Amino acid sequence: MTWRARHFGIWFRLTTKITVLERPRRFVDEQTDGPFRRFRHEHTFRDGPEGGTVMEDRITLASPVLGFVLERPVLVPYLRRLIEKRNQFLLDALDARAGRD
């Protein structure tokens, strides 16, 4: 799958491939082409309280520029906020859909 998004005012294109699929508990997508030297995103799912599901994201990356110098202070917090926003969007969409059923 190829994604196009603007980050830090610059347009990026990121192509990923699902490299691990252990349905229904885990899948991993990894960059095959894009701005990072390495980008791996692991999604895990486990039973949550009251019959719900808890999703956990784990991202491993290698910055294309200045490596570790930028990863910790800039990329990690930025990606954490981005993933949190995405997850909130998914929750809101699921809640809206559940309200229609």
Image (cartoon, rainbow, N blue to C red):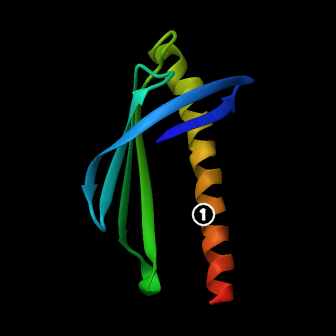
Q: Residues within 10 Å of mark 1 (few under 14, many from 20)?
A: few
Quadrant of the rendered image containing residue 40: top left
Residue shown at 44% from the left, 63% from the top: 55
- Percent across and percent down for residue 61 are 42, 29
- Percent across and percent down for residue 82 are 62, 44
- Percent across and percent down for residue 100 are 68, 87
In the displayed structure image, the side of residue 20 where residue 74 appears, left or right: right
Q: Residue furthest bottom?
A: 101
In the displayed structure image, the side of residue 63 where residue 94 appears, left or right: right
| Foreground residue among 76 and 1 | 1
Q: Residue furthest top?
A: 66
| Foreground residue among 37 and 48 | 37
Residue shown at 75% from the left, 24% from the top: 9
Q: Residue furthest right?
A: 9
Disc 1 residue type (three-letter): Leu
Element type where label 1 sits in the image: helix
- Percent across and percent down for residue 49 are 44, 81
The image shows a total of numbered marks equal to 1
Residue shown at 69% from the left, 31% from the top: 6
In the displayed structure image, the side of residue 12 where residue 54 appears, left or right: left
The residue under label 1 is 90
Q: Quadrant of the C terminus?
A: bottom right
Q: In this rendering, is residue 34 above or below 65?
A: below
Q: In this rendering, is residue 55 above or below 5?
A: below
Q: In this rendering, is residue 31 above or below 22?
A: above
Residue shown at 58% from the left, 58% from the top: 87
